[in-house]
Structures are given as structure tokens and as C-alpha cells.
Amino acid sequence: MGGPGSDPADRMREVEWTARADRVAPLVDGAEYFRALRESLMRAQRQVVIVGWDLHSEIDLLRGDEADEAKKRDGYPVRLADLLERRLEERAELHAHLLIWEGSPLFAFERQHLPRMKRPWAGHERLELVWDRETPPLAAQHQKVVVVDDRIAFVGGIDLTQSRWDDHAHEPEDPRRRVPGLLPRYGSPYHDIMLAVDGEAARVIGDWCRERWRRAAQTRLARPEADAAGHDDPWPPSVEPLLRERSVSFALTQPAFDGREEKRQVEASFLAQIASAQRFIFIENQYFSSDTLCEALCRRLREPGGPEVLLILPYGCPGTVQSMALDTQRDLLLERLREADREARLGVFWPTLRGGAEEDVHDYAVYVHAKTMVVDDGLLRIGSANLANRSLGLDSELDAFLRTEDGDEEGRQAIASYRRRLLAYLLGVQPEQVEAAEREAGSLVAAVEKLRGGERTLHPFEHSASTPQDLALPIELADPERPLEASDVLRATKLSAASAQLEDRAAMLRNRAIGTLRRNRRMLVGGALAALFAAIWAFSPLR
């Protein structure tokens, strides 16, 4: 692919490594990834390295009937902690190293409590858990990576933690999405993507994980020795490669911290890839809050005859704290895209299981956590980075992408099949229908408009953030482009804590209002809602 970013000097700014992979396979949704990971861990011989934003020792990698059948077939556990312990018992040469972000109090409700996490693995001499503190204040270690024996690596958006498992059906009340814990609780429909690579590409990512370990643990991990016994290939048997014998590039976001240089390769590569598009830019992402990336898309939309832009986002953030900043910023940026769209080449949608109905929307909207992009069916990108400011310069991120060479029709067809597969299952149709609609309409956005409209579908963004604008957290504090000064860190922490208190008070007052309505059915609903909002505002720490 030509255009910006094709110059070797530009590529150095966009890419940390480029390496050959024998096999490349996207894994769509947690069911595919967790199944594949279990199969690889069952074959681990020397070294397992896990780097993540979070990890939950008690997640089940298989669920329901599939779990029961697998345990009968191969005898291995499906729970992550039990599976690692079993494999360590079987292989005296195997070591497992878990590097998990230490976290922030702001994320405490989403993460497993420390003593509970350590319990399954306490004292195991060949399993080491290290908390990663090597981040600036309010920054996150956001990379999600697993490497097995340097022979296969998984990179992308899925952490091995609670509320990540789901299958393509995304059933609203699927009991298999039970969240680990003493009390029964179930996650909402959840869509995410990982990428599996092997060969030289896996060895490169293994080296990077060991470098991350050195920084955090102040000790070095050796490369795993090649196993001369010719043990099983750790590539998961359930996974059919999308492509073979391809070069894969990897881009980092690394904030300036503790003497290390800043790397903004994720940002540079996004900008170059957006600028290179000729026909379309297809994006699925959890957030859309980056002014820089918004302006890059606006420039393409303003061009006469420029590419289409198809953007798939979640309906909104599930929590008040995030929504205050990120949903509000998303609305502002989407309006800018609409103003730049002079030739009706923009489509922005959210996936739903109820045809766009907004009652109980978080039960029936499919939450998009995926971070993927396809450009002209000649470039495929999967990673951990969001279209957010912090993903470009504050959080640590790792994205993988591959480009097809001129004349590589097999590669283009494979990437097109991946993109159509995503669109088809979000629209509730078959990939062949997506291909036919594209051919008939001559347009990606028009094809989506032609196919959508059922219960399971992509619904256009017509709503805005539910949080009042004057309650919004400042975007420069909630989603900064670079590490903050100490005074800004303190201010952001105080505002976030106040927002969390507001969310708790709102829930309490909402429950009281519901009780009042049940006791007095003649109360006017409008008056109750007005009173509820007035009460929330009166108690708000942000007032």
C-alpha cells in the first residue's frame, strides 16, 4: 500500500518491529480466544509469559457443555489457575510468569482482590506473579499478551479477567457469562478480538514481554530453550489460520517515564494508515475521544471522492465516571465527523440485539471492546489501543498489523473475509450477504444500511451522552495525551473520587424513588424523575 507511511523513515516512527509469522489468525470474542489459549497452555513445555491490565485466576476458559465435554475428552481443567497448576505439575521444565498492572483505586471494583488472586498459586516455586508499577501516575499498563514457549503469541484487546468471555450469539441472559465470585452475577454481551501469531513474530513478542518483566521485577528471564524432543506444536488445533507466511508489524505506545523515551508509534501508524486509504476505513473500537485521530478522519471525509469511514462503537460507557468524560467527548467528535461528511461517506453504528430500542440498553446492546481496523482490505490491524488520547501517549499499548503487497489477491481476500465476518454477525446476516450487498450498492456504508434493521443489527448513533454536560469531567484530566503534572494528577483524582460518590448516591436515590413509585402508583412519573434529578444534583460533590 502506498501513500503516507510508505517511506522507510516514516515506517521507523510507526513500527517497533516487523517479523515473519508462519500463521496469523484473528480470534473473535472471548469464546474463541479462551478456547485457543487453553489448547496452547495444554501444550506448554518451557515458558508461559502473561502480560496484562488485569488477570483473574478463577475464570473458566471453557463454559457450559463445551467445558464438560472437554474435561471428559482430555482431562484438563478449564479454570485458568487449575490449568496452569496442572501443566506445571506435568512439566518440571515449565515456568509461568504473570506480569499484571498494579492498578489504580479508580479501577478497584473491576479487579480481583489481591489475597484472593494469590491463593491458588501461593508458594508455587515455578509460577511467579509480579505487579507492574512501571507507569506514570494515572497511566495504565494496557497491553494484553500471552506467549507460550516463544512459539505462539496472542496480542489484542482481551485480558484474562472477569466479564470478558462471550460467544458470537451474545445472548442477553447467557448463564455462561457468570462472573467469578461468591454471589451470582452475570456479564453483559461483550465483543472483543485477539490476534494469534507464531514463528519469528512470536519470538519478538516473547523478547518484549521479558523486557517488560525486567523493568518491573528487576530480574531477567531467559529465552526458553528449543525443545529437541519435538513436542506438540502449541498452535491451537481449533484455530484455522487466516493467512500464512506473512510479515507482521508491531507498534508501541510508551510514555516518557523513568528515563525511557516516549514512543508514539500507535499514533503515527494510525495517522499513516488513515491517510493511505483509497476506498474505505473500517474501525471497531471501545472509545472515540482522540482529537488527533478525529481530525485525521475529518480530513479524509472532506476530500472530494475520498474514502468511506465506517465506525462501530459501543452504545456508551457502562459507568458514570467514564461516561462523564468519554461519552461526552465522543458526542463532540462525532458531530465534527458529520460536519466534515460532505458526500454521505460516513457511517457510525452501535451493535444491538433489540433493533435499537433504548430501554435496558446495556442489557441488549453488545459492548464493543474490540480494537481493530481494516483499510481497503489491504491492511488488517488488531491491538490494545483505543481511539483515545491516553492510548496514544499515556498508557502502554501494543498493536499488530499486516499489509498486503501489490498483487497479493489471496491476502486481500482473506482480510475482506475477516471484515465481512465481523459485519455479518453484528448485523445478524451471513458473510455472503454482506459481500453481495457491497457489490450491489458499490459502497460499504450503503451495504450496512441495506442489511440493517432486524432485531440483531447495527443501529446508527442518534443518541448522546446521558450525563449532563455540566457534570462532565474535563477531558484533559480523564483522557490526557501525556503524563500529567503532579497538580493535575491530584485534581483528576479528586474529581474521579467525587464522580464515584455521585454514582453511588445516584444509585441509592434511584432505588428510593423506585420504592416510592411502587407504594404510590398515582405519582406522576415526570414529577418523580424531576425530583430524582434534583436530589442527585443537590447531593452531587461536583455541584
Image: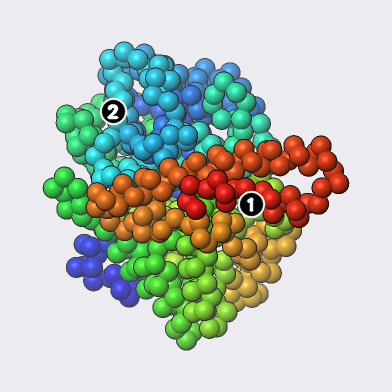
x and y percentages locating residue 254 in the rendered image: 25, 51
Kindly identify the residue that appears in the image at 39 percent across and 32 percent down.
234
- Three-letter code, disc 1: Phe
Query: Toward the viewer: 92 or 382?
Result: 382
Q: Mark 1 and mark 2: span between their CA atoms?
A: 44 Å
Disc 2 secondary structure class: strand
Q: Is the residue 105 above or below the residue 24 in the image?
A: above
* Residue lying farthest to the left in this orientation: 259
Image quadrant of residue 174? top right
Disc nearest the viewer among 1 and 2: 1
Quadrant of the snapshot with the N terminus: bottom left
Left or right, residue 539 beside residue 196? right
At label 1, counting other C-alpha atoms closer than 10 Å, the crowd grade (few under 14, some 14-19, many 20 or more) is few
Kindly identify the residue that appears in the image at 44 percent across and 28 percent down.
112
Query: Which residue matches tag 1?
Result: 533
Query: Which residue matches tag 2?
Result: 130
